[in-house]
Image (cartoon, rainbow, N blue to C red):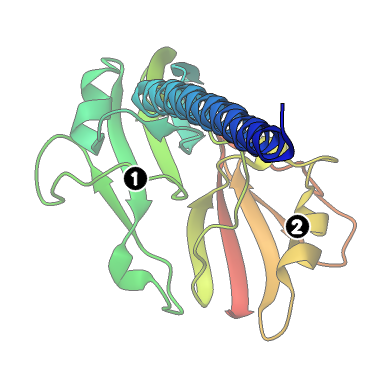
């Protein structure tokens, strides 16, 4: 073979090798891109599945009702201090409560007109005039009068955290729902100390013991009873 023919052959081989190398590179790049697209597709499917699962679980949580909770109350003959220690599943009035207590005839609450008044006055509902039916509310105190021992079970949801009831200047007839969640338990003295953050100045707490009111005065070591969530109390403050 002459020199010119040999050079042509070498040139042809070089061009052929370059074309082959280009085809290999293109093939590799194509495979890489396809793999990336597949990976992205798998990730997208996995993410959508995870999101759907999360949303479904959240939907179940929001649809799940609160655990049922029931609380039994017992009343003796005569006047009984009473306060709600649960969030009722349905509203309740004095008439509705008396309907569940055949041996009880009256329910007494603080007259709302006496909130912030120097004179504490009461309203008593007994199934007719002159006092109209009124709601039984959390954080309020009541007296239930019965002619014989009686009990009732109320349903709703439990109160997980205690918070102070609304207090007015002078005297407020209250309940302490959730106060049994406090540890150690509040005594009348400790609770008065807890309340007395300026400008509030509360001096005494009274409770009904079945026959009369028993009072504890701040700083005096007499009648320092433990506060309970189903009892009714009168809290007296010179300022709130």
Of badges 2 and 1, nearer the viewer stands 2
Looking at the picture, how far across and down is residue 232, in whole percent?
53, 44
Decide if residue 210 is in sight here. no
Q: CA distance from mark 2 to mark 1?
A: 25 Å
Q: Quadrant of the N terminus?
A: top right
Which residue lies at the image location 9% right of the left edge and 46% below the top edge? 129
The residue wearing badge 2 is 191
Determine whether the residue tagged by mark 1 lies in a helix, strand or loop. strand
Image quarter of residue 164 = bottom right
Q: Residue furthest right?
A: 221
Which of the two residues, 58 or 113, is positioned nearer the viewer here?
A: 58
Res 212 seen here: yes
SS for tag 2?
helix
Q: Taking 198 as reference, is 204 above or below it?
A: above
Name the residue located 49 percent from the left edge and 26 percent from the top edge. 34
Residue 151 vertical placement versus 111 (above, below): above
Q: Is residue 159 left or right of residue 125?
A: right
Structural crowding at the residue carrying mark 2, measured as other residues with C-alpha within 10 Å and reported as few (<14), some (14–19) or many (≥20): some
User: In the drawing, does residue 151 fall left or right of residue 97?
Assistant: right
Residue that carries the numbered disc 1 in the rendered image? 108
Residue sitting at x 59%, y 62%: 235
List the single residue furthest toward the bottom: 199
- Residue 151 lies, in percent from the top left, at 42, 14
Q: Residues within 10 Å of mark 1 (few under 14, many from 20)?
A: many
Looking at this view, is 236 or 163 the one in front? Answer: 163
Name the residue at 60% across, 39% down.
Answer: 178
Sequence-wise first label, 2 or 1 = 1
Placement of the C terminus among the 4 image quadrants:
bottom right
- Residue 212, x across and y down, in percent: 58, 44
Residue 77 position in % (x across, y down): 45, 21
């Amino acid at each position: 073979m002459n020199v010119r023919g040999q050079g042509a052959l070498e040139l042809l081989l070089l061009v052929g090798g370059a074309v082959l190398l280009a085809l290999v590179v293109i093939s590799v790049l194509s495979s890489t891109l396809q793999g990336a697209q597949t990976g992205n597709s798998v990730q997208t499917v996995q993410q959508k599945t995870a999101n759907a699962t999360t949303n479904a679980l959240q939907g179940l949580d929001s649809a799940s009702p609160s655990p049922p909770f029931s609380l039994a109350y017992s009343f003796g003959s005569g006047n009984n201090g009473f306060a709600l220690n649960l969030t009722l599943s349905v509203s309740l009035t004095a008439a509705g409560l008396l309907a569940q207590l055949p041996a009880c005839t009256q329910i007494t609450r603080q007259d709302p007109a006496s909130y912030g008044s120097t004179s504490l006055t009461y309203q008593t509902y007994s199934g007719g005039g002159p006092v109209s039916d009124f709601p039984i509310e959390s954080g309020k105190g009541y007296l239930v009068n019965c002619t014989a021992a009686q009990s009732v079970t109320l349903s709703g949801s439990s109160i997980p955290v205690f918070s102070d009831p609304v207090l007015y200047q002078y005297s407020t007839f209250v309940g302490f729902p959730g106060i049994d969640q406090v540890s150690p338990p509040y005594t009348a003295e400790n609770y008065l100390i807890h309340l007395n953050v300026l400008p509030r100045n509360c001096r005494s707490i009274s409770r009904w013991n079945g026959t009369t009111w028993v009072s504890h005065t701040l700083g005096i070591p007499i009648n320092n009873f433990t506060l309970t969530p189903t009892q009714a109390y009168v809290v007296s403050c010179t300022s709130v």
